[in-house]
Amino acid sequence: MDSAPPPTANHMLKLAAIGTVAGAFSGLFGVGGGTVIVPLLIFWFGYGERLATGTSLGAIILIGLLGVIAQGGIYGNVHLLTGVLLSIPAVAGVIAGTAIQQRIPQRAVSLLFAALLVAVAIELIVK
Amino acid sequence: MDVVAAILIAIVGGLAGGLVGVGGGVLFVPALTVFLGLSQVEGESTSLLIIVIVAVVGTLRQNAYGNVNLRDAAVIGVLSPLGVLVGVAVANQVSQRVLELSFAALVLFVAFSLVRRVLSAPR
């Protein structure tokens, strides 16, 4: 939880860099910020995999919300009903996923993440 | 059949979000475009809505498990729009193909680093 000491300037600078890079990559490739946020939290802050992935989801709320407001509110591109309906199985998935994650070793999370990154790389190269 | 496929893909996208902390957009977009007939921009936009809902529930679950640093998450999220502007500026200067291949190389390097870290520091 949020019992960390006040952040140093260096810590804030790195967080700012992660936010900027995550935003840039999601803008450039449509790849969600999580691809960037999770490894940087692990390598720069020594976060454990569970803390990194949980914090990443928290950041993604804000990143996605800004996108939804822009795309839905300004351009009218969001299909509200379709999105809400498809969220139901997706939410079931995320509840199961977080529950499973608490029961597997953190290093397994890193390996799963590495596999996902390889898939993303292949998709980028092939498309 | 297409609806069933979309639902199954959505479940897998949610699972990925819970397991590795990504939004799942990589999966939600094709579920919406290929199987539910939305255009690419509609699919990407609607995918963002699903990502937000998934991220809210996922964050609540992870927070209950003690795995969320809310302050760090808020700082990263609030500063990301700055990055979007940077991304747009870069996209206008460099070819999309060069960007894709550069990002692919970076992503592969990060994957390699994660695996090396796991193998070299047994816990």
Image (spheres, coloured by chain):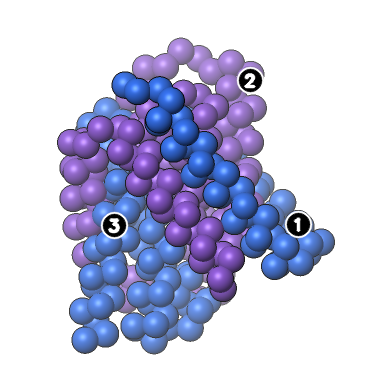
User: Which quadrant of the view contains residue A111?
Assistant: top left
Which chain: purple? A
Give the residue at mark 3: B14
Q: Earlier in the sequence, mark 3 or mark 1?
A: 3
Crowd rating for badge 1 (residues with CA inside 10 Å; few <14, some 14–19, many 20+): some
- Does dot 1 land on a helix, a strand or a loop? helix
- Does dot 2 land on a helix, a strand or a loop? helix
Give the residue at mark 1: B90
Give the residue at mark 2: A10
Identify the residue at image location x=25%, y=32%.
A105
The CA span between labels 3 and 1 is 31 Å
Is residue B81 visible in the rendered image? The answer is no
Task: Give above or below for B72 relative to B24.
Answer: above
The CA span between labels 3 and 2 is 33 Å
Identify the residue at image location x=81%, y=61%.
B93
Judge left or right: residue B43 versus residue B53. Answer: right
Q: Are marks 3 and 2 on the same chain?
A: no
Label disc, if present, on residue A65 of the rendered structure: none
